């Protein structure tokens, strides 16, 4: 519990300071880079203050200038503040549509090219995919948690189909990402953070054009992500 309170207190102290600097600069310049840098660094530092170490694997093999779609598993609320800051370039993410109703925050998120999503509405979900495709076309990477929600037991949930339509239509290379360790540090339905190490594994990019359809791409991404999970979190092999 103490670790969680330390993280929250750190964020409570630093977020207003970052906002005080970042928001005016963003609105005056029309550029979100300073606010993005401050926000991701404060988020990441808060996780480290809570006693969480972060190990990154495979990032050096990626082209820093490429526009990727990063597709990751999701087991903890710590996943976003760990994953997004270690991606070298500014990345867009899918954000609940409700947050775009907050006046100042919504303007900053639009400048950052974040994409509002409403999964319960099919037409709105399609519009979100089109918006994400436009973001990729501008050279901004996308980061997506492809299960759509956090796994309760650490195993992979069924993947959402939308991100794979996006990949096939945009042609953007897909980087599967496996986050390991956060299920132990802060699992779903738990508030208290344990000390530990979170490992972020970036797998080799997959070219959507090399797959016959989205289902084949989905299977390849799933296999890549699952390959870095501990044995107890992998799907048991089917007998012949």
Image: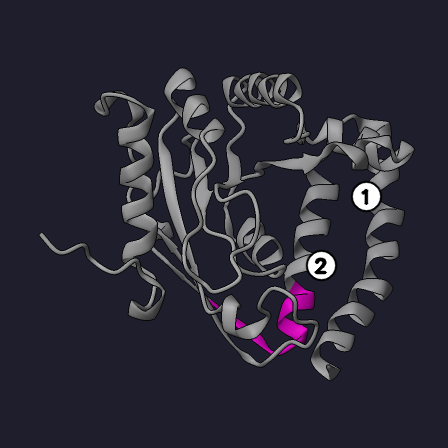
Q: Is residue 47 magenta?
A: yes
Instruction: Estimate the x, y position of residue 204 in percent, counting from the top left.
Output: 28, 44
Classify residue 166 as left or right of residue 186.
Answer: left
Q: Is residue 140 left or right of residue 38?
A: left
Q: Residue at x 32, y 41 (%)?
A: 221
Query: In the rendering, at what x and y percent does residue 237 appear?
Result: 20, 57
Task: Work out whether residue 51 or residue 63 is closer to the camera in this orientation and state it.
Answer: 51
**Residue 215, position as x, y percentages in the image:** 31, 29
Residue drawn where x is 65% and y is 66% of the image: 189
Q: Residues within 10 Å of mark 1 (few under 14, many from 20)?
A: many
Residue occupied by mark 1: 22
Q: Could you tell me which residue is drawn at 63 percent across and 61 percent down?
A: 44
Q: Is residue 205 visible?
A: no
Spatial separation of the CA atoms under disc 2 and disc 1: 12 Å
Magenta-tinted stretch? 45-54
- Which residue is the site of mark 2? 42
Q: Quadrant of residue 238?
A: bottom left
Quick one: SS at disc 2?
Answer: helix
Q: Nearer the viewer, residue 15 or 182?
A: 182
């Amino acid at each position: 519990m103490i670790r969680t309170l330390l993280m929250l207190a750190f964020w409570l102290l630093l977020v207003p300071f970052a906002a005080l600097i970042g928001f005016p600069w963003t609105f005056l310049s029309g550029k979100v880079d300073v606010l993005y840098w401050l926000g991701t660094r404060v988020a990441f530092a808060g996780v480290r203050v809570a006693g969480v170490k972060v190990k990154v694997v495979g990032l050096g093999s990626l082209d820093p200038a490429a526009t990727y779609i990063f597709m990751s598993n999701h087991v903890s609320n710590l996943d976003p503040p760990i994953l997004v800051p270690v991606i070298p370039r500014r990345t867009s993410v899918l954000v609940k549509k409700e947050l775009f109703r907050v006046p100042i925050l919504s303007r900053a998120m639009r400048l950052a090219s974040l994409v509002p999503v409403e999964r319960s509405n099919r037409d709105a979900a399609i519009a979100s995919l089109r918006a994400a495709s436009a973001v990729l076309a501008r050279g901004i990477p996308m980061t997506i948690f492809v299960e759509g929600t956090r796994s309760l037991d650490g195993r992979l949930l069924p993947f959402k189909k939308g991100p794979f339509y996006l990949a096939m239509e945009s042609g953007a290379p897909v980087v599967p990402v496996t986050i390991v360790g956060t299920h132990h540090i802060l699992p779903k339905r738990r508030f208290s953070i344990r000390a530990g190490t979170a490992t972020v594994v970036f797998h080799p990019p997959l070219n959507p054009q090399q797959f016959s359809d989205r289902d084949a791409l989905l299977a390849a991404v799933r296999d890549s992500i699952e390959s870095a999970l501990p044995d107890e979190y992998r799907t048991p092999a089917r007998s012949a």
